[in-house]
């Protein structure tokens, strides 16, 4: 921390001087080093520094220094280890700042380190609207790489005055060796993506630079043929042209271009389909100017048996290396069932000289730790973490309130400094690099966190968050907003005081004309808006039931129909305006209708602003049905409505999916020990809303993955009484056969598939299962299945004496 403070002080003092720095580079710099130098010269940060700045490889530095500085540099640099891939050193003496890379990439990452700590700036995108680029794409050719980037010095503003720290500046020996060799992000230029399908090549270049500044050394590109439409209505250029253009950009900047190529044909056991695939693959890799690696998932997407998949990849690897001789090849076991996993491990035990290693991502029955243990050490293992999604995901957000799940959804703007830091550290010992799974810019902060940890594992989440605020938003204090947004999702929404604090923090900081600022503002406002609506709609429903206890149907309807207040409407207006700015500024598609998103679940949560957060639709229908009954039947039906979830005396009720109302659910270990929840219960929601006529209690459910049973456990039952069980099965639209077992011995119902969604099942329990006063209920799904592992979904459970 002291060294980082020294660097910040050196940079801040430099920023306070009017004399621009003189950039000194090696005369025999490589082409990539020259690219880095040209980039640095374009950065207004350089103009705000003072003195001499040396940008060179470590072996070249001494020759560029005057004697006194050279001696100091040599004394310190002799203490460093031999050159490491992508490592860099930072050193200061008098008015000299030395950025020394152990290789060309290290030089670039050292420059990125300085830029992260240097000045407060506004972002490139302020004056470079993606939407405008889309409009112009058909009229003018795109500018060459680099043109139009960072040309306006007004994009930067000076840091606050730090002259009070003058005199405390000391030498800055800092040496950084990357923690992981591969630090990459997936890019999907496709219709499903929430933003990248709107990017032009200049925007991709700026995005690549931003990622490099934090430590990214590669992009993984989804092939044009995948589990998606071949075209997007927002494409500014054809998919293949953009792939080729970005491949050239990565080569120019000296980072990796990883091709993600799912096998999408129906049957590769068919020689004709196999031949067609190989021909199509060869055409793509021949047309792509630069490929570092080939990634082929076993599933998600894909469905090919390992015995057929491995020979196919072997042949594709041979084709690939005709055009890209140094390319590496990776495979995953995603989606495989238990038998396929065993066959996969058997094939991995064989000699496969064409195969570099395995990547482990979502929809994997075996975790990265298990796979690392079972795969021979000669193969490398990469992690493929999902950093984009909140639910139905590899890393579901713990305790994600149902109101957030219904509105902000599965793919929202999601800064998670602490959670992503923990996930990285939890699994770090088992992988040698990573490619994050992303679906656009909504996970922008998480991308920077992962590569920040991958560059320097000692960095804290708060440090990287502050760098994000400083580099992109002109003020390190924005890091507190990122951390606040993460806290907004912790605990029950209606009682979360962090939501108002986070919004207040954001509003006290200077507003930026910048898409990243707009994203943070959109999330902070959306959180506050949902909280206000959730509280108000809960109150409206409570008032409606109070009226029904008085048999006043009209007053109940009035309570349910109460409109949002002026403050809530003002928040909605702000959110809608920001959504438009984000589409104009970075192509973020927050609405299907307004901005061309592929689906509301793909980040388009502007379309969920007005979704009901109570049972208004269902309750209104109940009132109409009761009023239509004969007078003699109304009282009984109304009483059942008012009693709806209350168990009879001596009974128990669990609203599964609501952490505050499921006391008998066995949750398993702590999230910290199992962030994927492979061995514990998960709270989630169905693909429905209350406006579909579903109750919230049906929409929320609990589930468990793969062979982990979903369990409820009861104590203190009346041993002398027999009990009845009532279960509401509800969840996602697909269903698997579930078996219900009591006390691990008595099958209460054999494997049965839900017949409707939701479905209520009632059954009498054999007296012997409750005779001890204790009861365990476990739901099992068929063993050995692959895919996501989901499908064991239960919404409500009552247990009561007969």
Image (cartoon, rainbow, N blue to C red):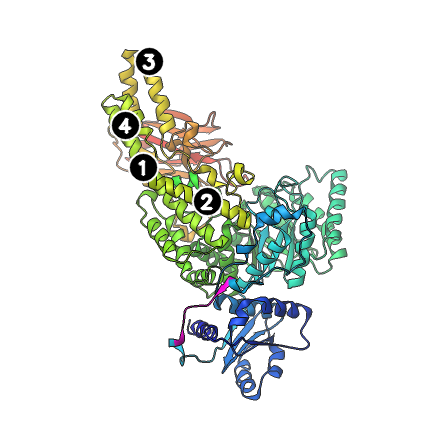
Task: Give the mark toward the camera: 2 or 3.
Answer: 2
Residue that carries the numbered disc 1 in the rendered image: 536
Which is nearer the N-term, disc 3 or disc 1?
A: 1
Q: Residue at coordinates 40% horizontally, 81% vertically from top-left?
A: 167
Q: Is residue 445 left or right of residue 659?
A: right
Quadrant (top left/top right/bottom left/bottom right) for the C terminus:
top left
Q: Residue 48: image x %, image y %?
A: 51, 71
Q: Residue at x 61, y 54 (%)?
A: 204
Give how far apart the Cα atoms at labels 2 and 3 are: 47 Å
Tag 2 near tag 3, CB within 8 Å: no
Percent across and percent down for residue 69 are 54, 85
State how far apart marks 1 and 2 are (Cα). 23 Å
Residue occupied by mark 4 = 545
Q: Nearer the viewer, mark 3 or mark 1?
A: 1
Query: Mark on residue 443?
Result: none
Q: Please tell me whether mark 4 sits on a helix, a strand or a loop.
A: helix
Task: Return the disc, 2 or 3, that comes first in the chain's sequence.
Answer: 2
Residue 664 seen anywhere in this rendered image of the structure? no
In three-dimensional space, the C-alpha distance between marks 4 and 2, rounded to whole angstroms, equals 36 Å
Camera-side residue: 511 or 444?
A: 511
- Sequence-wise first label, 1 or 2: 1
Picture layout, residue 106 above or below residue 134: below
Q: Which residues are magenta?
A: 155-163
Where is residue 511 drawn, in percent x and y? 43, 56
Residues at badges 4 and 3 in contact (C-beta under 8 Å)? no
Label 4 to label 3: alpha-carbon separation: 19 Å
Earlier-in-chain disc, 4 versus 3: 4
């Amino acid at each position: 921390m002291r060294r980082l403070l020294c660097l910040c002080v050196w940079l801040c003092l430099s920023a306070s001087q009017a004399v621009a720095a003189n950039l000194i580079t090696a005369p025999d710099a490589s082409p990539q080093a020259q690219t880095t130098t040209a980039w640095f010269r374009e950065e207004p940060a350089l103009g705000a520094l003072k003195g001499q700045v040396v940008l060179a490889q470590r072996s070249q530095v001494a020759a560029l220094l005057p004697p006194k500085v050279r001696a100091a540099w040599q004394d310190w640099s002799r203490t460093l280890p031999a050159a490491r891939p992508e490592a860099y050193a930072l050193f200061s003496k008098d008015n000299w700042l030395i950025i020394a890379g152990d290789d060309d990439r290290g030089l670039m990452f050292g420059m990125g380190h300085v830029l992260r700590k240097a000045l407060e700036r506004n972002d490139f995108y302020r004056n470079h609207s993606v939407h405008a680029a889309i409009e112009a794409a058909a009229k003018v050719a795109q500018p060459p790489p680099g043109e139009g980037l960072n040309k306006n010095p007004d994009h930067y503003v000076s840091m606050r005055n730090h002259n009070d720290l003058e005199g405390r500046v000391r030498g800055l020996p800092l040496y950084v060796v990357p923690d992981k060799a591969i630090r990459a992000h997936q890019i999907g230029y496709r219709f499903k993506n929430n933003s990248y399908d709107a990017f032009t090549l200049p925007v991709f270049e700026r995005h690549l630079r931003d990622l490099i500044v934090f430590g990214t050394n590669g992009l993984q590109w989804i092939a044009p043929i995948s589990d998606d439409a071949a075209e997007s209505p927002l494409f500014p250029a054809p998919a293949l042209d953009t792939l080729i253009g970005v491949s050239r950009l990565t080569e120019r900047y000296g980072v990796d271009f990883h091709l993600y190529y799912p096998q999408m044909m129906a049957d590769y056991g068919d020689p004709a389909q196999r031949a067609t695939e190989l021909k199509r693959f060869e055409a793509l890799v021949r047309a792509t100017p630069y490929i570092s690696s080939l990634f082929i998932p076993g599933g998600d997407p894909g469905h090919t048996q390992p015995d057929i998949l491995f020979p196919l990849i072997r042949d594709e690897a041979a084709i690939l290396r005709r055009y890209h001789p140094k390319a590496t090849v990776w495979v995953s076991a995603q989606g495989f069932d238990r038998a396929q996993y065993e066959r996969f491990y058997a094939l991995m035990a064989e000699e496969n000289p064409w195969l570099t290693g395995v990547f482990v991502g979502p929809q994997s029955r075996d975790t990265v730790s298990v796979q690392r243990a079972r795969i021979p050490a000669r193969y490398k293992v990469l992690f493929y973490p999902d950093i984009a999604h909140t639910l139905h995901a590899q890393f579901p957000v713990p305790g994600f309130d149902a109101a957030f799940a219904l509105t902000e959804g599965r793919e929202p703007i999601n800064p998670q400094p602490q959670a992503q830091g923990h996930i990285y550290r939890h699994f770090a010992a088992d992988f040698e690099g990573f490619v994050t799974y992303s679906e656009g810019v909504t996970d922008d902060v998480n991308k920077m966190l992962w590569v920040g940890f991958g560059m320097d594992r000692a960095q804290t989440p708060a440090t990287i968050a502050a760098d994000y605020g400083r580099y992109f938003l002109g003020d390190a204090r924005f890091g507190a907003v990122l951390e606040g947004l993460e806290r907004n999702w912790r605990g029950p929404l209606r009682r979360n005081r962090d939501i108002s604090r986070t919004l207040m923090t954001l509003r006290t900081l200077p507003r930026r004309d910048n898409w990243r600022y707009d994203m943070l503002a959109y999330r902070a406002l959306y959180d506050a808006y949902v909280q206000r609506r959730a509280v108000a709609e809960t109150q409206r429903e409570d008032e409606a039931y109070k009226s029904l206890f008085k048999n006043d149907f009209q007053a109940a309807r009035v309570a349910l129909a109460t409109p949002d207040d002026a403050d809530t409407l003002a928040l909605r207006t702000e959110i809608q305006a920001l959504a438009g700015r984000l589409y104009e500024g970075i192509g973020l598609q927050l609405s299907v209708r307004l901005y061309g998103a592929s689906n509301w679940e793909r980040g388009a949560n502007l379309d969920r602003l007005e979704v009901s957060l109570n049972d208004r639709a269902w309750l209104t229908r109940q009132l109409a049905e009761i009023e239509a009954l004969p007078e003699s039947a109304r009282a009984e039906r109304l009483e059942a409505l008012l009693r709806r979830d209350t168990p009879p005396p001596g009974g128990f009720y669990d609203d599964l999916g609501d952490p505050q109302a499921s006391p008998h659910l066995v949750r398993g270990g702590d999230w910290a020990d199992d962030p994927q929840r492979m061995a514990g219960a998960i709270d989630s929601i169905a693909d429905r809303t209350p406006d579909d006529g579903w109750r919230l209690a049906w929409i929320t459910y609990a589930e468990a993955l793969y062979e982990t049973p979903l369990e409820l456990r009861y104590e203190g039952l009346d041993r002398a009484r027999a009990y009845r069980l009532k279960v509401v099965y509800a969840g996602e639209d697909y269903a698997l056969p579930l078996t219900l077992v009591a006390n691990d011995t008595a099958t209460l119902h054999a494997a049965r598939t839900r017949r409707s969604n939701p479905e209520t099942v009632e059954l009498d329990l054999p007296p012997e299962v409750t005779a001890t006063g204790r009861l365990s209920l476990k739901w099992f799904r068929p063993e050995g299945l692959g895919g996501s592992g989901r499908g064991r979904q239960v919404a409500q459970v009552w247990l009561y004496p007969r």
